[in-house]
Image: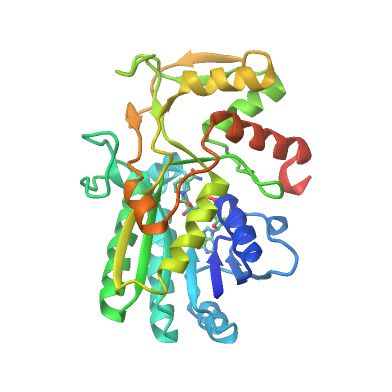
């Protein structure tokens, strides 16, 4: 299959590109490099620098490469930034995405997989979260993901597109070649690795949640497991009826911040330096996926689900890239 991966120079996109290439697919990456890294794209994969909102570039490359399916990972994805700059998130995650969909319509590309987020659920009433839970995002980032899902559903109905929206929970870990290199870094595991490296304590945001140990509970899914799910979802779009299918991608297990820290203590043989601070506004006590639908629809299950695998692979990548991709 000839696949366009938008955001393929980013964390999730680059590991998925690796997986698609390994499975024998022909991959083209379109990335503006606003948060991604040119070096994350493997040699032999065509790289096009540009925005998904650029109709001319998108139209040209869909036709020139005779693209059959799109994996749309490109987005802005920092919650705090989205609160400060909602218009930027609207432009990049919704308007640019809609331009991409229009380009696909023009070129007759009818297979689409979208990187969505558990942020579409907001504060869930029930855990584990199933796909039919109400979509009530509580920040502009989550709202742009929800609104793009609406646009995608409309496009799927109008253009007989077969689309899958994958709602990721917390992505973690690394492949041998690619890992997480974000600035600022807001995710727990790379943040704790930074604390181990520098000796500067990291902050645990809140220990008074209604959870067994008081810290927030999250569902961590290995980035390589996510890449397997992307491949399966792209394959699924060959055969299903037109429309939009929503699937949660998580391990189905929740770990508290303290449990993640204890796993890291075991990996490093010493405690991760940390202090406890106040809760962050808008952080739900627990976010855990029901992954039953994804298991059934994709024939997928997480194979690298332990915290030690996620922390260990992220640490190994960091050791090989002490200054990130640009080092
Ligand atoms: N990492 C997570 O834990 C997580 C969780 C839920 C959802 N997601 C979603 O997964 C996707 C990938 O996340 P990530 O962690 O790899 O982020 P990332 O920032 O590492 O990757 C995003 C990539 O998209 C590119 N990009 C951004 N806007 C673009 C545009 N308009 N045109 C072309 N390229 C553009 C960036 O340069 C970057 O390479 C995002 O859609 C994000 O919302 C990630």
Residue, x 69% and y 69% (percent of image)? Answer: 45
Image coords of residue 303 (percent x, y): 53, 43
Residue, x 35% and y 29% (percent of image)? Answer: 281
- Looking at the picture, does residue 134 appear above or below residue 213? below
Image coords of residue 124 (percent x, y): 25, 36
Count of all numbered marks drawn on residues in the image: 0
- Looking at the picture, does residue 307 appear above or below residue 168? above
Quadrant that contains the N terminus: bottom right
Image coords of residue 115 (percent x, y): 44, 56
In the image, 123: left or right of 223? left
Q: Is residue 90 visible?
A: no
Looking at this view, is 19 or 165 the one in front?
19
Residue, x 65% and y 18% (percent of image)? Answer: 200
- Looking at the picture, does residue 72 appear above or below residue 65? above
Image coords of residue 82 (percent x, y): 41, 46
- Looking at the picture, does residue 194 appear above or below residue 124? above
Looking at this view, is 19 or 172 the one in front?
19
Quadrant that contains the C terminus: top right
Looking at this view, is 102 or 299 the one in front?
299
In the image, 128: left or right of 234? left
Residue, x 49% and y 20% (percent of image)? Answer: 259
Q: Is residue 206 visible?
A: yes
In the image, 120: left or right of 10? left
Specify the quadrant of the image occupied by residue 27. Answer: bottom right
Specify how the rendered protein is coloured.
rainbow
């Amino acid at each position: 299959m000839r696949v366009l991966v938008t955001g393929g120079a980013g964390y999730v996109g680059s590991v998925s590109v690796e997986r698609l290439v390994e499975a024998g697919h022909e991959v083209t990456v379109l990335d503006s490099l606003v948060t991604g890294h040119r070096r994350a794209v493997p040699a032999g994969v065509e790289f096009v620098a540009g925005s998904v909102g650029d109709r001319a570039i998108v139209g040209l490359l869909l036709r020139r490469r005779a693209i059959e399916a799109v994996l749309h990972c490109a987005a802005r994805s920092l919650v705090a930034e989205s609160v400060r700059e909602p218009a930027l998130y609207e432009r990049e995650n919704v308007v640019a995405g809609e331009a991409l969909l229009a380009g696909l319509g023009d070129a007759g590309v009818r297979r689409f997989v979208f990187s969505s987020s558990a942020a579409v659920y907001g504060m869930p009433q029930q855990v584990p979260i199933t796909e039919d839970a109400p979509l009530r995002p509580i920040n502009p980032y989550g709202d742009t993901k929800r609104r793009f899902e609406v646009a995608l559903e409309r496009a799927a109905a109008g253009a007989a597109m077969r689309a899958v929206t994958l709602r990721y929970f917390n992505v973690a870990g690394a492949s041998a070649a690619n890992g997480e290199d974000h600035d600022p870094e807001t995710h727990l595991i790379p943040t704790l690795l930074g604390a181990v490296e520098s000796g500067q304590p990291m902050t645990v945001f809140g220990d008074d949640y209604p959870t067994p140990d008081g810290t927030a509970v999250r569902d961590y899914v290995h980035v390589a497991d996510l890449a397997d799910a992307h491949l399966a979802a792209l394959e699924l779009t060959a055969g299903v009826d037109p429309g939009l299918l929503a699937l949660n991608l998580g391990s189905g297990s929740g770990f508290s911040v303290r449990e993640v820290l204890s796993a890291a203590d075991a990996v490093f043989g010493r405690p991760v330096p940390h202090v406890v601070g106040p809760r962050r506004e808008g952080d739900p006590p627990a976010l855990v996926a029901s992954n039953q639908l994804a298991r059934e629809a994709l024939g997928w299950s997480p194979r690298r689900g332990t915290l030690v695998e996620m922390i260990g692979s992220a640490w190994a990548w960091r050791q090989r890239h002490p200054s990130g991709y640009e080092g």
